[in-house]
Image (cartoon, rainbow, N blue to C red):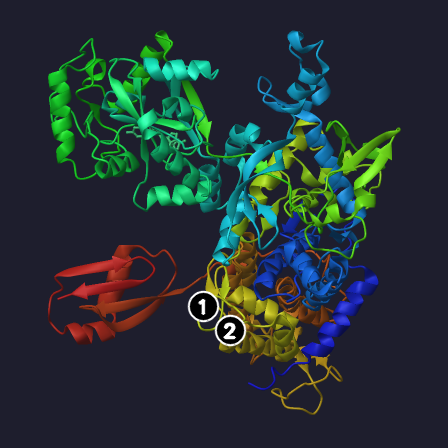
Amino acid sequence: MSHPGYPFADIERKRQAHWDETRAFRTPEDPSRPKYYVLDMFPYPSGAGLHVGHPEGYTATDIIARYKRMCGYNVLHPMGWDAFGLPAERYAMQTGIHPAVTTEQNINNFRRQLKSLGFSYDWERELSTTQPDYYRWTQWIFLKLFNSWFDPEQKKARPIAELPIPPELAGDANARETYVNARRLAYVTEAPVNWCAELGTVLANEEVEEWTSKGYSVERKPMRQWMLRITAYAERLLEGLDRLDWPSGTMELQKNWIGRSEGAEIEFPLTADAAARAESAGLPASLRIFTTRPDTIYGVTYMVIAPEHPLADALISSDQKSAAEAYIAEAKLKSDLDRQVQGEKAEKTGVFTGGHVRHPLSGEAIPVWIADYVLMSYGTGAIMAVPAHDERDFAFARRFKLPVRVVIAPTASGPREPSGAAPDAPTDAERRESEAAGARLKTAFAEEGVNVWSGPLDGQPTKAAIGRMNALLEAQKLGVRRINYKLRDWLFSRQRYWGEPIPISFDEAGHFVAESEDSLPLLLPPSDNFQPAATGESPLANLPDWVAHARDGKQLRRETNTMPQWAGSCWYYLRFIDPGNSDALIDPEKEAYWMGENGVDLYVGGSEHAVLHLLYARFWHKVLFDLGYVKSPEPFQKLIHQGLILGEDGEKMSKSRGNVVNPDEVVREYGADAFRLFEMFLGPLEAVKPWSSRGIEGVARFLSRTWRLYTQREGEADDADRSTLQGAAIDPRVYADIPEDRRRDAERVIHATIKKVTEDIERLSFNTAISQMMIFVNEFLSEKQLGRFGAEAFVKLLSPFAPHLADELWSLLGNADSLANVPWPAYDPQKITVDEIEIVFQVNGKVRGRARVAPGADDESLKKLALADPAIQRTLQDQTPKKIIVVKNKLVNIVV
Ligand code: ANZ
């Protein structure tokens, strides 16, 4: 199709200019009205410009924002830029062009593109995470984290000044400082990190996959890093999910990422020789393990410690020394993630230490192995291996020919009838039996069941057995119940230039010296050298005059790491509420009004942020909540992920495939309204769906039919190509009174359309709302008789979707200039009720006649009506019906 046939370019230009001039979408501060906060995940302004995936979510939120405004809400619908980050810095490394320059260009381009789509953002609240008056407050929050600790009793963050100091430390300034620093929510640690040499920076665990999938390699390397103590919030981050209206898949991802697991820590004493070595090294003479299945304790046949485990040296015997040390050296090169993935898939590797521990209940000596499927960073870094009931242990035991002992049967009638409560550990004979059963196993039985060959646990179902074993171990002081989380603290520093400077310095003795809050922002210094420093430090280390500074006569060195891109996006939704505030992060009254009890009312963005941004932002929000800066416990009440838009070929859009659709071209050819409408018409918002160029022509035709329905041009046929606005006028037939004989039907369609579109918008079911509007236009296109109410109502319904065209028609209808704040139309339920419906009469399933009846007619009268129908009588002749089936309001089927 060459031209969609209505003057969209003129209309859209005119309408956008008008919105700009009248500041149509400025958010008033009006606490008397109910609020609605609808937020998009703000974009990273990349050099490639807007992608068709961006406007999908943005159109959805714009429909909601416009609809809610018309429903009388005070709507906050802002837009900004998540503009720190790696791509601009990598570009700077290649070209020497300062990231601030490219970032500004990209922002300008993104803004132009978004404006061309007619989104009703309050542009006066636009912000960028790279603006000093924004990152000033990001740094301020960092200082709050630095100056807070998590009180495990009150389960909340408190100012560090309130941290109780153990009396024995009172006199020792250094010990005291170490104690305090180890409890801050922002702290420094020397830890093995994911180092990416090509990027010249470390990556958070959450980021590794993204970059390795792009072909970058990531290695483990110990480095001094800033961490945020998100683990302190594990439980609250988990509990908080209960009150949220989020996609279940995303909640599941967060739950798994937090990874709560209930179990026990159990002590396995070292045998005498190893114990002596441990004690001489100042280490405990017992190996502490974490297990979720203490009920399987009689099935332990070996132990595994992580290669980094502190007791490794003590456990390694002299004849195993060289083999064990070689294994440890190799394991050091792998990241936890690699080890975890490998632990699931590849063949297990490991080495015997030569050392043993004693089973805490039976006293049996158990060999200790080193294997990298056990991670030092989880639990205690050591496990009791129960190969009969754990997949990884099973694979390992088979590989290294270690015994397998069955101690759980699927049901009570398993390998052996339960013998009742045996007071002691299993006998040698029983152990042999359970090993014989183990030798026959094909895979581990990792589910719950009933204990067998388990001494005091015999016959107990799993849950009861766990409880009984925990009690038994606790009574003998051999173990404690324990909850573990998979969640790790958040690695927060990056060796980058283009990020927020961390507002901390160090004095000559290495003590922290924080910037004072009122000296912020600590500005990112100008530079033209974006290469990492020779030391592997961030490019900021290339600026000695910035790094070295003096305060109160003390020589200080600045932290040269910067914050990760996630920092700025952790709290931007708060700043939109009060973007100009130079005295505070946010005015408490404005915060109370706009965030209310539940925070942002609707948040739309990509599902790729499920465990990154969405977890980090919740964490910061909870800290701000604890410290009294926000009143809602959670930031985002309702969350929706828009589905990916694929290329026309059904593949992910990518430059290399050549299937990328450029929004600018679509807007040029079909207009912004058609583009918006089409993005919503592709399918359900959350579904993954391919682009279709035929489809966009379809919606463009719908819009030109709408234009034709409303307008006429003197002396021209109805289907004329109206390429300019000139001479366009409303066709008077559109709003003339509907003639009596059509009125009832016309009103039914009008009111049913209001109902359907309203309800569909509320359900975010935009594609079905558009279908209904298409039906509406087809219904009226030839006669045009809508009446004033119908003509105006339809334009209002259309306006959230195709705001330019709707505003133009609205003003052509003789109204004020914009529908932005015009009340949403209400429908009259009485006008939708149908007074007659069609019933189909069938004989043996074939349609033979029809009748119009009042809805709800009872079965008996429908049967009578069918049998009396002349066409049916003709078909039946003299046959007597065997059976008559009635489907209410639909059909009567006569079986002969
Ligand atoms: C004995 C056992 C028997 C286990 C059994 C499982 C099944 P979650 O917390 O659910 O992931 N484990 C403990 N620490 C580990 C570490 N640092 N690295 C690797 N594995 C570790 O699972 C906890 C279980 O994972 C623990 O329970 C332990 O194996 C293993 F029939 O102990 B179990």
Contact between marks 2 and 1 (CB within 8 A): the answer is yes
Image quarter where ligand 1 lies: top left
Farthest residue, direction right: 553
Farthest residue, direction bottom: 715
In front here: 354 or 607? 354
Tell me residue 865's x, y (percent). Answer: 27, 64
Residue tagged 2: 659
Q: Name the quarter where the C terminus is drawn.
A: bottom left
In front here: 398 or 49? 398
Q: Amino acid at mark 1?
A: Glu
For disc 2, the neighbor class at 10 Å (few under 14, some 14 to 19, many from 20) is some
Residue 569 appears in the picture as rendered: yes
What residue do we see at 72% from left, 31% from top? 144
Q: What label sits on residue 651 in the rendered view?
A: 1
In front here: 280 or 360? 280
Question: Considering only vertical position in the picture, is 754 above or below 532?
Answer: below
Determine the CA span between mark 2 and mark 1: 8 Å
In front here: 852 or 724? 724
Mark 1 residue's CB less than 8 Å from ligand 1: no
Q: Name the quarter where the N terminus is drawn.
A: bottom right
